[in-house]
Amino acid sequence: MSKYKHKDKVEAWTKVLMGNAEHMKSRVKLSIQSGALMTIIIGFVLGLFIYASVAKPATTASNNNPAHQIFALVLLVIAFLGSIWWLVANIMQLVALNMIIKGYSAEEVRPIISKWIIIGLVRYPNRYLLESVDTEEELSILRDKIENNSTQDEAQITETNKDLVKSNNNNDDENDSFKFVNEENKE
């Protein structure tokens, strides 16, 4: 029996997904790509196997044992269904992340997260994910710090650019005076 109830998992995953939506979206997209490729390959092999067994039934040769063919067919079907399950679970997580990124509230996203946890057989998030976002207050403080740092960085860049312009203007004045001295020497 799990020590966490479904409601606890939904609350914890809602916090984690709300705090790390952009980062997790890129990871889920990669997982969907690999899952889709896996599903296509397994489905293609399964289709070839079924076609080969229907088009030309097994002969009496020792390497064409029907029991082995049935066993291989069952394994391919299980692998195909597993890859489809993996793909569906990742797509459900992507839907939840897209809703979060678009600005839906936690109450609106919770039903999707709940279904994702059930279908994807998702366990409780580990402590490293939970430490990243403890409360919404800390999340808002973190966002404020990021915004303040970016405005401070922009101010520093602007100040540095002004200093560079001043130094370039000073260099231009020195070059002009050098030209003036050279013109006097020519006369």
Image (spheres, rainbow, N blue to C red):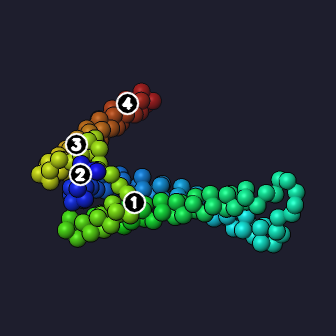
Q: Which residue is mark 4?
A: 178
Decide: few, some or many residues near mark 1? Use Cα within 10 Å; few <14, some 14-19, many ≥20: some
Look at the numbered discs 4 and 2 and tell me whether their residues touch, using CB distance below 8 Å: no
On the rendered image, what quadrant is the C terminus found in? top left
Look at the numbered discs 3 and 1 and tell me whether their residues touch, using CB distance below 8 Å: no
Q: Which residue is mark 3?
A: 131
- Identified by mark 4, the residue type is Phe
Which residue is found at the position 37% from the left and 34% from the top? 175
- Identified by mark 2, the residue type is Tyr
Q: Quadrant of residue 127?
A: top left
- Tell me: 156 left or right of 182: left
- Identified by mark 3, the residue type is Glu
Decide: few, some or many residues near mark 3? Use Cα within 10 Å; few <14, some 14-19, many ≥20: few
Look at the numbered discs 2 and 3 and tell me whether their residues touch, using CB distance below 8 Å: no
Mark 2 vs mark 3: in front: 2
Q: CA distance from mark 3 to mark 4?
A: 63 Å
Please give the count of numbered marks on the rendered protein. Answer: 4
Mark 4 vs mark 2: in front: 2
Q: CA distance from mark 2 to mark 3?
A: 17 Å
Q: Is residue 162 visible?
A: no
Give the mark, 4 or 2, whose residue is nearer the N terminus. 2
Give the mark, 3 or 4, whose residue is nearer the N terminus. 3
Which residue is found at the position 47% from the left and 55% from the top? 31
Residue 26, percent across and down? 41, 54
- Tell me: 8 left or right of 180: left
Q: Which residue is mark 2?
A: 4
Which residue is found at the position 17% from the left and 51% from the top? 139
Q: Is residue 119 above or below residue 125?
A: below
Which residue is found at the position 27% from the left and 69% from the top? 111
